[in-house]
Amino acid sequence: MTRLPRLDILIYAHDGRGLGHASRSIAVGMAARRLTPGLKVLFVSGCRYSRELIDNASLDWIKLPSYETEVVSGTSRGTAGKSNFSDQHLGVLRAETLKHLVTLYRPRVVLCDHSPQGKHNELRPALEAGFASDTRWVLGVRGVIGSVPQMQSDLSRILFQRHYHSLLWYGDSNVLGQSHLERLHRQFGVKPVECGYVSRLLELMARLTNNSDGGRFLAGTVSIPWLGENSMTLLVNLAEALQHLGPSHGQWRIFVGTGNNPDGHATIHNLFQNIPHCTLEEPSARYAEALIHSKSAVIYGGYNSVIDVIHAGLPALVLLREMQDDEQQNHLKELVRKVGGQLAVLSEKDADAVTLGTLLQRQLKRPLQRPDRINLDGAENALRHLTTILTMDRALSR
């Protein structure tokens, strides 16, 4: 059999509770297809919303069986996925699948999001296989890492130093300072490459025909990508607040990821079905379109959601879940210093109907805000680093 040409860039994101890992990785893939269309690029993840996040971009992808998690008393734990394999068994199966993919496609560069070993060590066999084929491994991490055991472990440091070529930081030191860069340097022994924040919405808007600030006919977009312990209470209060707010500001688009909870979907539908100025739907490619036509947004405090509303210039109400990891709280504290009242932050447990209504009224009165005080070119800068590696390796192989 004729030896197949090598894949240029393989991008891997493990799937967590939210969409941040996949969203950042897809944005880099979109940048690759937009700026270097001749490269062979493939995205791999178990994220069940990958197709929706990719939208109509010409980025091809492979779907792995999904991990599932639940949150109990602020702590996340793994559960059986939709394939009914346990968290641990999926780790083993995905490890062998990833090893096979690396062996088959022989990527010149692999970009991984978040941790060198993957969520359940699923990258370790692929690292060994990739090492034999001269694959260059690159790790990309979010602006505020948080208390992630995999990132702080001795194994993480050993695997990175043994197999990885470089480290990308998806943050802006003008916002977050130097401490996160220094922490990464101490953990992995290399100086991170500062890329700036990665915005999937920025990449999507580069493809949309109407990416102006005109046409803001929606009152707001609401995003609840996964249901936590207090989400149903929050939705009850939100329905009451939006009903009291009335239709004068326009329509509200409410995107709720119900996952494996069909009863939850029916309950949420009943909450909003009698509010004419609210429409309810699952997360989809329509979310980005809704954002760019909205006057405001209600989101949770994940990296992806916050950076998207900052790029869109939207005044937003940012909700915080009660998690033991304070990553989102710490990140938002620094961002609010930079963008001020554009982001109104509220703990989920304090989000009663009256408070929600008051804050929504306030945010709807705020003007759109230009995002030029924050570096949002992370996807493009990450791609530049990857293409530099490809160019150097090709020059050396001549």
Image (tube, rainbow, N blue to C red):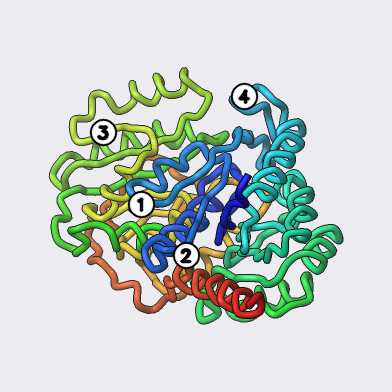
Q: Label 1: which residue?
A: 57
Q: Is residue 145 left or right of residue 55?
A: right
> Residue at (84%, 58%) from the top-left corner?
155
> Residue at (55%, 64%) from the top-left corner?
331
Q: Where residue 361 sits: x, y (%)?
A: 26, 52
Q: Does label 4 or label 1 sit earlier along the sequence?
A: 1
- The reply to whether callout 1 and callout 2 are in contact (CB within 8 Å) is no
Q: Nearer the viewer, residue 244 or 305?
A: 305
Task: Say which amino acid is labelled 1.
Answer: Ala
Q: Label 4: which residue?
A: 83
- Nearest to the eye among marks 3 and 4: give it: 4
Q: Nearer the viewer, residue 233 or 374?
A: 374
> Residue at (65%, 64%) from the top-left corner?
139
- Nearest to the eye among marks 3 and 2: give it: 2
Task: Say which amino acid is labelled 3.
Answer: Thr
Task: Say which amino acid is labelled 4.
Answer: Ser
Crowding around mark 1 (Cα neighbors within 10 Å: few <14, some 14 to 19, many 20+) is some
Crowding around mark 3 (Cα neighbors within 10 Å: few <14, some 14 to 19, many 20+) is some
